[in-house]
Amino acid sequence: MNTHTGSALPTRHQRLITWINEVAAMTTPDAVVWCDGTAREYAAMLQITQEAGTATPLAKRPGSFLFRSDPSDVARVENRTYIAARSREAAGPTNNWIDPVELKSTMKQLYRGCMRGRTMYVIPFSMGPVGSPIAKIGVEVTDSPYVVANMHIMTRVGSRVLEVLGEDGEFIPCLHSVGKPLGPGESDGGLWPCAPLEQKYIAHFPEERTIWSYGSGYGGNALLGKKCLALRIASVQARDEGWLAEHMLILKITNPAGKSKYVAAAFPSACGKTNLAMLVPTLAGWKVETVGDDIAWMKFGADGRLYAINPEAGFFGVAPGTSPESNPNAMASITRDTIFTNVALTSDGDVWWEGIGYDAPGTLIDWKGAEWVQEGESEPRGPAAHPNARFTARASNCPSMASNWEDPAGVPIDAILFGGRRPSTVPLVHQARSWNHGVFMGSIVGSEITAAALDLKTGTVRRDPFAMLPFCGYHMGDYFRHWIGIGQRTEASKLPMVFLVNWFRRSAKGKFLWPGYGENSRVLAWIFDQCDGVPGKSIETPIGIVPVPDAITPPDGVSADDMRELLAVDVAGWRKELADIEAHHYPTFEDRLPAELAAELAALKQRLQ
Ligand code: SAT
Ligand code: MN
């Protein structure tokens, strides 16, 4: 860590220095600190936040701390997230758009003097292994020590990044402020600083490859390497450069014969990507290892196959529902060096949340800082942990990481999965007949809404194509076209096979038909065998390729009838689905909808006649 007053800067990158000087002149912080990514610096951030009263050290978990956010600042805010491309058309119908000149002028007013009374941190970070040809460098400027500590876990931060950047390397400027300047002698009073909703802006300038975020300290709004850089800006770069930046986990699966394959899977936020990436198979002899849990960058290798890297270095996982039962590897990852946000605190200095697998041990302090008792209360009160409470944990602390997870060449992808929470219609698993049919599957993905975004009504189904609706940095119709184009760049046999999965099917009575978690290994094993060309495991149906009745052995508690229902082709349901896509979903993309997708829709309709 380095406090500089103008001399001895840790870089000679003139463009970077000029930008930092401009930001400091605009935001007027009390001090400017260049981050070096050391353990000492991480400890200092936690010391500062402890002294400010926003971090609580956890006696039961070494190097771990609890933060409680402001109750208004608990998730991404999609209606305050903007793609400020030069034209509205370039941002497309699914993104919020403001003219970039207008947005910059509004935001400059907010940024003026916004770091008064605070320290401005300059965080050089790498998405992907430092120095690897596929990595991208960002520099985040922030007035939040909480953000610095989280960036230490989620990305590769430090002096080595500045070395790689040299004197004129490319970097993505990421400007962040919590938006709460302090008056002379004023402090945060132990409270999480942020700005009111109408002053929050999560802004992307795709042509300039620049990110400006103001007013929120939470997750994807503030840790700008994640959704803002690695998805929204990177998706634009990927379009221009012929690769893919996707909201996908990456896992390695090994069969009992010792043969391995790699799977990338896209699910909307809070639909179990972390659990699937760290799955412990219930099927004897099979092994699953983790490469990433949220983001995949995929590029063609010299052999014409798609190779994926995980650009992140940690996990920002949903805490509620995470238990030794549902995700033992995540539980092992969070025993130390972890930042918890908005979970409950026990009296002996540990964390607790709904679905952790055991009752609350006595009186807790809930995520809002109030006393909370599990039983014996007449008044029902809210949950002890916020439903979008998170843990920030290092990948290096996760026992299921694959030994090659940091290979700069990436891992060759055999299968791509799409999925969401669908109570009906979509079967447990089915396979696309072709690449374009797979792109069609990705384009129609729908899911019941979760708590990962603040401003959406939970429990209703929305279409979330490729799980990228909140994360695509340009016109989604063009994004579909880019995916079709990827399929034309190599031989069909070298492309990953595409599957649609649904762990969330319910019976007519509302009961989940499939137990999920480790039992999903049964579905992964079928997918593995399909990729391996094992004969006799599948049949063609109008909607695509499905497992033959005995290809997936039902787990305990799933009857033969349940299994039939899980794999059935619901013709009436699909007809309704297609009518909805035709009437409400595809028209959104107007003339930018690729003809190939309209043709896939028509062909599927035909097959269902
Ligand atoms: O807050 S994040 O955007 O990082 C988490 C998520 O929505 O997936
Ligand atoms: Mn995500």
Image: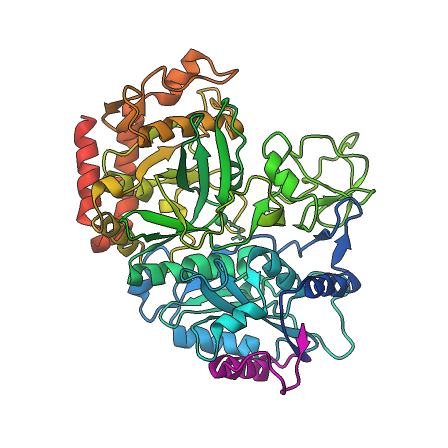
Furthest-bottom residue in this view: 7
Residue 82 relative to residue 162: left or right: left
Name which residue lies at 39% across and 28% down: 424
Q: Quadrant of residue 123?
A: bottom right
Q: Is residue 561 above or below residue 353?
A: above
- Residue stretch in magenta: 1-30
For the N terminus, the quadrant is bottom right
Side of 554 where 391 appears, left or right: right
Furthest residue toward top:
560
Residue 87 colored magenta?
no
Q: Nearer the viewer, residue 360 or 224?
A: 224
For image coordinates 57% across by 56% down, the residue present is 154
Q: Residue at x 32, y 29 (%)?
A: 530
* Residue 468 seen by the camera: no
Horizontal and vertical percent position of residue 534: 30, 24
Quadrant where the C terminus sits is top left
- On screen, residue 9 above or below 239: below
Q: In the displayed structure, does residue 140 sit left or right of residue 98?
A: right
Which residue lies at the image location 57% right of the left edge and 46% below the top edge?
Answer: 317
Residue 354 place in picture, x, y as percent = 66, 36
Q: Is residue 4 magenta?
A: yes
Q: Is residue 404 above or below residue 602?
A: below
User: Where in the figure is residue 55, as x and y percent of width and height?
Assistant: 74, 57
Q: Position of residue 291 (x, y in %)?
A: 48, 45
Q: Residue furthest front?
A: 258
How is the protein colored in the picture? rainbow
| The quadrant where residue 399 appears | top right
